[in-house]
Image: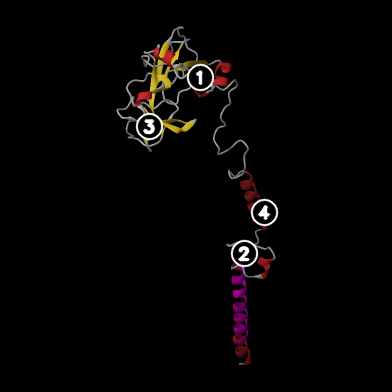
Amino acid sequence: MHHFAYTPRSLTIALALAACELPTKLGNLSGTDTDEQAGTTLDATDGETSAGTTAATTDNVSDTWLTSTSMFDPSETTAGPIPETTDGPVPIDCLELGEADCEASGCMAYYGSAYEFPGCTSGLLFLGCSDPKDCEHDQHTFCREGTDEAYELIETTCEPPGYVQCEPPGVAFCDSCESLTEAECLAEPAECQPIYGAPHIETNGSVCADYTDMQFLICQANGGACPPFVPVVCDPDNPEQPYDSPSGCIPAGWVECGERGVSGCD
């Protein structure tokens, strides 16, 4: 009786001890056991350690890193091909050169004399630079495009950059008339014209223009008809003496001044 009663009790204790070991084994599988923290890895299928497998995996990772395309390769670049450099001098753009560099660079320089126009400059002037050309040595007139400027080129028939061949404007060369006396100016009717003025004087307490004493003011290039009104003009060197200019022309280098519409002296 006592023997049969003792046996089931022993079986119950054995089953209880077996049940206590199960969470420990499951805990090892979940990676929470202290053995895993020490570096031991269990196989997911049979619970055996896989230290050899871990070492192999590490070797594979190392090999993969060594062969990765993310590693820097000096032969690979994203900057594109390096442009090739060429030896030899850089081509010269003659059109951009000034007088000092034009002929020195083997280019062709153009020179001409200006016909009379407002703001002109006398003498032989540099007009531009271009690539060398085969030109005849002759005398031609060229006009700057979009302006009233005209120049006579003596040594070439080729057009300077920005100029076109044109007819001579029928006026004197720049500043060629201003130096002439009255008699010399009258001797050049085709190119020069004399400008006369009636001086303003004070008489009987009032100012009038003395047309009986017309004075030679200047000789200037014959540029055609002057405006149809009588300006009052002054020499900048003598601004206190105004003149009526009955031709309507304002002498080159002179300025308008005084009161216009002054009556003539009796």
Rendered residue at 51%/24% (across/down)? 96
Q: Viewed as shown, does residue 46 lie left or right of 224?
A: right
Residue 17 drawn in magenta: yes
Q: Residues within 10 Å of mark 4 (few under 14, many from 20)?
A: few
Find numbered disc 4 in the image and state the secondary structure of the residue it sits on: helix
In the picture of the structure, the residue carrying the numbered disc 2 is: 47
Q: Quadrant of the C terminus?
A: top left
4 or 3: tag closer to the N-terminus:
4
Rendered view: 172 above or below 202: above
Q: Secondary structure at mark 3?
A: strand
Who's the residue at 57% across and 31% down the image?
Answer: 82
Q: How many marks?
A: 4
Q: Nearer the viewer, mark 3 or mark 1?
A: 3
The quarter in which the N terminus is drawn is: bottom right
Quadrant assignment, res 210: top left
Counting from the top left corner in percent of width and height, residue 47 is at: 62, 64
Give the magenta range. Answer: 9-28
Mark on residue 232?
Answer: 3
Q: Is residue 66 above or below residue 219?
A: below
Judging by the rendered image, the residue that carries numbered circle 1 is: 126
Q: How is the image coloured?
A: secondary structure
Badge 2 or badge 3: first in the primary sequence: 2
Q: Main secondary structure of the magenta part?
A: helix
Judged left or right of residue 106, residue 222 is: left
Between 21 and 96, the one lying in front of the other is 96
**Amino acid type indicated by mark 1:** Phe
Q: Position of residue 67 (x, y in %)?
A: 61, 43
Give the distance between the C-alpha atoms of the residues marked 4 and 1, in whole angstroms.
87 Å
Q: Which one is in front in this view, the residue at disc 2 or the one at disc 1?
A: 1
Nearest to viewer (mark 2 / mark 3):
3
Q: Which residue is mark 4?
A: 55
Residue at the spot 39% in from the left edge and 22% down from the top edge: 195
